[in-house]
Amino acid sequence: MSDIRQNYSIRIQSRRVALTTGLATMLFCAAAPALADTVPVGVNIMKAPPPGQPVQLIAWLNDYSYLQDPKNRTGAGWERLSYIPLGNDPSHFLSIGGEARYYAQYWEHVTLGVRPDDRNDSVEQRLRLYGDLHWGPNLRAFVELGDNWEFGAEFPTPNNFDSVDVSQAFLDLSFNAGGNRFTFRPGRFQMPLGNGIMMGTRDGTNVRYTYNGLRAWMTTVGGNRLDVFAVRPMAVGRGSFDNDDDNSRDFSGAYFAHPTGKGSGVDVYFYNMGHDRVEFPGLIGAQRRQSYGARMFGKPGHWDYDLEGVLQRGRYAGEDIRAWGVISNGGFTFSNTRFTPRLGARFNAFSGDDEPGRGRLGTFEAPFPRTALHTDAGLFVFMNLVNFAPSIAFQFTPKVRFSAGLDFLWRESTQDAIYYGGSGRPLATPTTRDRHVATSVDLQLDYQVNRNLNFHLFTSHIEAGSALLAAGGATTDYVGIWGQYRF
């Protein structure tokens, strides 16, 4: 830990230069007038937004090709950066964008009290600048630079530190055949899939999940889509322009999405993950794990639902892997009531290991999970865990959304450990057969000021259950707030 702090403190001066430059860029763009129309918080991160909607979480999802037609331009200042024509052909254009996010967080116990003196508070700085070149409808080049820092952390997070480096860089080569559209994407890219739970973004840290390799997809006239990919996760270096492949891991798979109506569909997928060194209680070894999943989702009337099931097979340190997971989320929205309240509930279950040391591993493990599935605190992961979380949300205005909920968490197997969200590795193994890990009270407030600027506040009170207390854990509180500007 001391080596990390010493290494990063040497670079503070260069970070100050990057911070000043980045803020100057963001302030210049902030001076451009934004559209007055906004939409509620929580837009689908995997769909390109209609004109005038908030700038997207994933930068390459922003599609400004509609600005090729002068009739679609409003004269807003941001359009001058989002659509820069290159020559006489309107389909040849460049988009320039970026992001500045400052994220302050406080954990009373960042390891749930299992380790001594584990109070942690920090401020994360994320700066991004990208160029998105479109040369007609079939050729695209995207490059994004990032600069990341974490100030004041007692427990520094490696994925919050990355000097100026290439965050993403890829080509899109597309063509049409038989009414279908094919796209090949070699390079470095972010790749959330489906609802972003099994394959998430890791947006709670400065550096998202990023991959080097090849992704290709086909889209049919009817809207079906098949994604295939073969990649390695990106290893984050400590210097500038030193990020590279993580050669200890490989990842490949396929994802098929079939729409069944407006806002509804059925997905099936296969993930194949290899890892040279993985730790489970009492055992360390190489792992090859396959995930077979299916998802069904929809919005019939006032209801909404999202159901997903996963089976896992493979080998780990000479043992067979036999694991499973269930992911569900549903609710009812009172659309004709003031503040359009939504009553919702999540139920998730991820298997644990019932018979440690007997030649079969039963612990579920998602390839690249959404770290904030339970709370923004990121203290729990999808391993040997069952949770039930009722909630209520209010859309006070088109820009302001508030939600409150409870989350009850138990161990699926009393023979297995409690796993830590920060690493996905065992945090503690209770000496009792108690299942109750924790109960949290969660409050969230989102304010989408305009298409560019948003604020997010999340707080949790996490009451330690009998299993966590037996492992030496403690009750803890978490508060996180960010301000984020994207253009």
Image: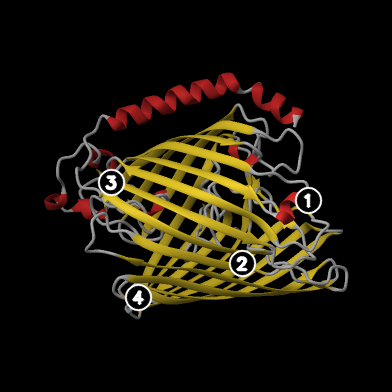
Residue 252 numbered mark, or none: 2
What element does badge 4 sit on? loop
Residue under label 4, please give it.
223
Distance between the Cα atoms at labels 3 and 2? 39 Å
Task: Work out whether mark 4 precedes mark 3 in sequence or the reverse, and give the earlier one.
Answer: 4
Residue under label 3, please give it.
399
Figure label count: 4
What element does badge 3 sit on? loop
**Residue 322 visible in the shown view:** yes
Distance between the Cα atoms at labels 4 and 1? 50 Å
Image quarter (top left, top right, bottom left or bottom right) of the C terminus: top left
Residue under label 1, please give it.
471
Task: Work out whether mark 4 precedes mark 2 in sequence or the reverse, and give the earlier one.
Answer: 4
Disc 4 and disc 1 in contact, CB within 8 angstroms: no
Circle 2: residue type: Ser
Mark 3 surroundings within 10 Å by alpha-carbon count, few (fewer than 14), some (14 through 19), many (20 or more): some
Task: Work out whether mark 3 precedes mark 1 in sequence or the reverse, and give the earlier one.
Answer: 3
> Which is in the foreground here, disc 3 or disc 1?
1
Mark 4 surroundings within 10 Å by alpha-carbon count, few (fewer than 14), some (14 through 19), many (20 or more): few
Q: Quadrant of residue 172?
A: bottom left
Task: From the viewer's perspective, tell me whether residue 150 is left or right of residue 465.
Answer: left
Q: Residue furthest left?
A: 71
What element does badge 2 sit on? strand
> Which is in the foreground here, disc 4 or disc 3?
3
What element does badge 1 sit on? loop
